[in-house]
Amino acid sequence: MSALHDEINRLKEEKNAIILAHNYQPKEIQEIADFLGDSLELCIKASQIEDKDLVVFCGVDFMAETAYILNPDKKIVIPDLEAECPMAHMLPEEELLKAKEEHPDAGVILYVNSIAEAKQHADTLCTSANAVKVTESLPHDKILFGPDKNLGMHVQKSIDKEIIPTPKDGHCYVHRLFHVEDIELKREQYPNAVVICHPECSPEVQEACDEILSTGRMLKFIAESEKEEFIIGTEIDMITRINSEVPGKKLYPLLEGAICKTMKLHTLEKVRDALKNEAPEIIVPKDVAEKSLKAVQHMLESSK
Ligand code: 13P
Ligand code: SF4
């Protein structure tokens, strides 16, 4: 272990801190995290950290904001404040309010990848791991669903409700990089491999895959599968996570260049500094956090 690792561990103990990290974090961050997971697993974990005073969130802004909404009395810090998810910013509060006015009879489900100012106007939230279940849990026949159009269309396929994408073309720029031709090419190269993609991929890509799974479910699926080879259609460091936990499998990226740039802004040095300085802090305005909590709790309840 390096001196930097020692320093991080010492500061963590001194500050009674926990390091939460998303599956897309680079290897060195995955290795020092106390808890690694997909968005839903991270939300659940963030709701169970009563004994900690400080949370270092190695992920993107909306994840740290959700941890704050669940823990307004704790300090939530993010090693690099620039780590934003562009998709989360594709649905501004005003646009959601306008859509609600146009569809007053619709329920509102927001992907957890949304800004807190929008979350406060949602009936509930979802992640890619629980989107269908959460949508079923609302009594409405019509659902305003945003910001990810592709996840909305994925839900639409298995549910008898009308999904209205809000905005019309919310998307993840990383998952938009995948095309059907990439799958065809990889299938030729690795004919025995199971092709797995994330529901943020386009409907055509989803259609051409064998499994459509959240990052957490990818890990579970591969661990439980008797198959040996898998083509992974999501952010590149998901392979790092699976490799470290499920030895003996052969994993091939659908695209080597599928990199979420902002997820990679966190470094060990920045984690050390965040612990030392208890900054940069993520703070959601009190009224916004209070109003958003209802939707976060509804999601956690309905995904049990
Ligand atoms: P997961 O919840 O599947 O980890 O997805 C989060 C995300 O941002 C995918 O791009
Ligand atoms: Fe946002 Fe896409 Fe990065 Fe996920 S991969 S955090 S949706 S930009």
Image (cartoon, grey):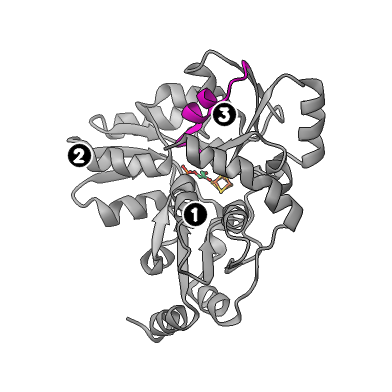
Q: Is residue 141 left or right of residue 224?
A: right
Q: Residue at x 39, y 26 (%)?
A: 209
Q: Under 8 Å from ligand 2: the CB of mark 3?
A: no
Residues at badges 3 and 1 in contact (C-beta under 8 Å)? no
Residue 140 got which mark? Answer: none
Disc 2 crowd rating (10 Å Cα; few below 14, some 14-19, many 20+) is some
- The residue that label 3 is drawn on is 150
Query: Counting other residues with Cα less than 10 Å from the Cα at mark 3, is it few (<14), some (14-19), or many (20 or more)?
Result: many
Asked if one can make out residue 206 in the rendered structure from this viewpoint, the answer is: yes
Give the percent coordinates (x, y) of residue 215. 41, 43
View extreme (top): residue: 160
Q: Which residues are magenta?
A: 127-141
Hey, what amino acid is under mark 1?
Ser
For image coordinates 50% across by 31% down, the residue present is 131
Describe the element under mark 2 as helix, strand or loop.
loop
Q: Is mark 2 within 8 Å of ligand 1?
A: no
The answer for how far apart the CA atoms under marks 1 and 2 are is: 35 Å
Residue type at numbered disc 3: Asn
Contact flag, marks 3 and 2 (Cβ < 8 Å): no
Q: Residues within 10 Å of mark 1 (few under 14, many from 20)?
A: some
Q: Which residue is mark 2?
A: 228
Indicate which disc, 3 or 1, sits on the residue closer to the N terminus.
Answer: 1
Q: Where residue 95 sits: x, y (%)?
A: 79, 34
